[in-house]
Image: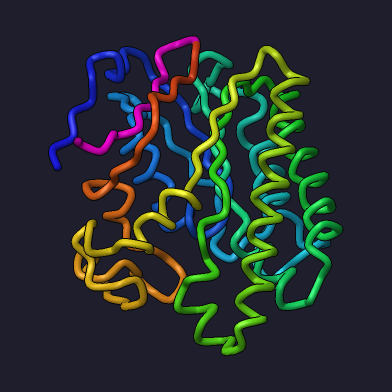
Amino acid sequence: MQTTIPPSCQQRTRQYWFAFGDSWSATGFQYQLYTTLGIKSDGKYYSPLAIAGATIDNSLATWGFGDMTSQIDAFQLYYASRPASAPWTADNTVASFWIGVNDVYYGFAHNDDPSVFVSRLMNRYRSLIEQIYSNGIRKFLFVNCPPSTRSPQVHEENDLPEQFQRHAEMATAYNEGLNSMLFQFRDEHKDATVVFYDSFQYMTRVLDDPAEYSYQDATCMNTDRSSCVWWNNLHLVGNITTTKLRIWCPFLRLSGGDITLQCIQRKP
């Protein structure tokens, strides 16, 4: 499918993009997603602060890697002062967040109550985005947890139907909690632009009908990034967020400045 970015998406000034999250950001999936959605610039400053294996806060859930809390600390140390190397402004800067898959698996593996566990996570998540809001960030992109219950990893490590059900319940609780937290954040910060991308919904479509997207099935893995939906046992292939991206959705716009997002719509 040929993708054309409209003239309105062509950037005339340098823009800054600070990416926070886990491996779905650190390995380039987030970059592919957002460039596909239309963030276009001749002078983009992309700072991937994300860490593979990250959770929101290691004091709440951890797999032994850095967390998003440390990523925010790094932003405070290196970028909050708007140094000469990155003199960002509220108008030309986006902060993106794609995290949750590791938190969901931790809560599932430790048999935590979804509502209690997710409430703790979202309270911490909110406090972290408040920090960079206080630094002057006003444009935010958020992506929810993908349908990781259907990943080869979850199926390799579990085999009982009730386990898959519990994992799915944790993922659902996480996404619902994120949605509620973002509505509250947006309502309490009228000067902020908050854009949400539903990766769970779109990727579920692909997994429900992989042939429609030219994939063999919903379970195979292959690093060729073309024949199978899964690149490894946890990550979907990058093509899903680039040339094979088909989403029924309206245009999304980060109002103000020149930063525009476009969802690629499925042809009739």
**Residue sitting farthest toward the front:** 268
Give the magenta-colored segment's residue range: 256-268
**Where does residue 197 sit, x and y in percent of width and height?**
49, 39
Q: Quadrant of residue 224?
A: bottom left
Q: Quadrant of residue 179?
A: top right
Q: Residue at x 54, y 44 (%)?
A: 143
**Where does residue 102 sit, x and y in percent of width and height?**
63, 65
Question: As drawn, is 180 to the left or to the right of 138?
Answer: right
Is residue 9 among the parts visible in the rendering?
yes
**Residue sitting farthest toward the left:** 2
Q: Residue at x 59, y 26 (%)?
A: 194
**Where does residue 111 sit, x and y in percent of width and height?**
79, 76
**Residue sitting farthest toward the bottom:** 159
Seen from the viewer's position, the closer of residues 23 and 189 is: 189
Q: Image quadrant for the N terminus?
A: top left
Is residue 63 among the parts visible in the rendering?
no
Seen from the viewer's position, the closer of residues 121 and 127 is: 121
Asked whether residue 7 is drawn in magenta, I would say no
Q: Residue at x 20, y 36 (%)?
A: 267
Q: Image quadrant for the C terminus?
A: top left
Q: Residue at x 34, y 71 (%)?
A: 218
Asked whether residue 267 is drawn in magenta, I would say yes
Tell me which secondary structure the magenta stretch mostly adopts: loop
Question: As drawn, is 105 to the left or to the right of 2?
Answer: right
